[in-house]
Image (spheres, helix red, strand yellow):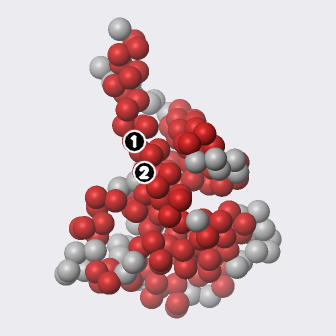
Amino acid sequence: MAPVLSSADQLRRLFAALTEQTFQVEFGVADPPLVDYLSDMLVRFVRFEAIYRVRDVVGRRLEEVADMLLEAEQRESHPQREVHRHIGDFTLFWTGVYPEALKRLKAFDRKDVLIDYQEQGKRSYFIASTFDNEPYLDEAPVLRRLSDEFELFSTGLRQVRREWERLPHEWSADQN
């Protein structure tokens, strides 16, 4: 029987270990704040409502990047930064962790059909990184690096997923 993680702390530790192992050992990315950001994003996005947390002015959940971009343009300063950071996270999550979902997310009957998730993720992370004063001083360089090397981090997250998919089988085998 596969192990079940019983707490958010265990899940956080699992994602932190997998992300650190993948990025430091396999990709040579020794950047603890960046690795922490990615593992925190994975923990946040375990909850479906966090993936679709951006709402319009009437409270309607925005499920497409095109709608999120329109919402970002209507917001001022820091709320705009948060929407762009979320767009970066959203596009990185789908291109990296679940790229097979892109076919559905970008179907011909959806607004996102013409949006390049990698290019938009890079652009949104870049915009969010330009807010580099307090309280965003520490996160700005992380977002800039995510913008500059989006493809690397997308590929790395795909590897993190492969590793976590292997764990239950290996762990179950080791327990016998």
Q: Nearer the viewer, residue 128 or 35?
A: 35
CB contact under 8 Å: marks 2 and 1: yes
Q: Position of residue 106 (x, y in %)?
A: 28, 74
User: Residue 158 got which mark?
Assistant: 2
Image quadrant in which the N terminus is located = top left
Q: With respect to residue 24, does 93 lie above or below?
A: below
**Can I make out residue 51 in this image?**
no
Which of the 4 image quarters holds residue 166? top left
Q: Position of residue 165 (x, y in %)?
A: 36, 37
> Which residue lies at the image location 66% right of the left edge and 85% below the top edge?
77
Measure how far apart labels 2 and 1 are at the Cα level: 6 Å
**Is 113 left or right of 34, judged from the image as shown?**
left
> Neighbour class for label 2 at 10 Å: few (<14), some, many (≥20)?
some
Q: With respect to residue 116, does 157 lie above or below?
A: above
> Which residue lies at the image location 44% right of the left edge and 80% below the top edge?
68
Q: Looking at the picture, which amino acid does disc 1 mark?
A: Arg
Image quadrant in which the C terminus is located = top left
Helix, strand or loop at label 1? It is helix
**Can I make out residue 41 in this image?**
yes
Q: Nearer the viewer, residue 172 or 71?
A: 172
> Which residue lies at the image location 35% right of the left edge and 76% below the top edge?
64
- What residue is pinned by disc 1? 162
Q: With respect to residue 171, does 114 lie above or below?
A: below
Q: Nearer the viewer, residue 47 or 20?
A: 20
Q: Position of residue 150 (x, y in %)?
A: 54, 66
Q: Report the residue that reaches farthest toward the left.
A: 109
Q: Position of residue 21 (x, y in %)?
A: 58, 38
Q: Looking at the picture, which amino acid does disc 2 mark?
A: Arg
User: Residue 120 got which mark?
Assistant: none
Which of the 4 image quarters holds residue 62? bottom left
> Neighbour class for label 1 at 10 Å: few (<14), some, many (≥20)?
few
Helix, strand or loop at label 2? It is helix
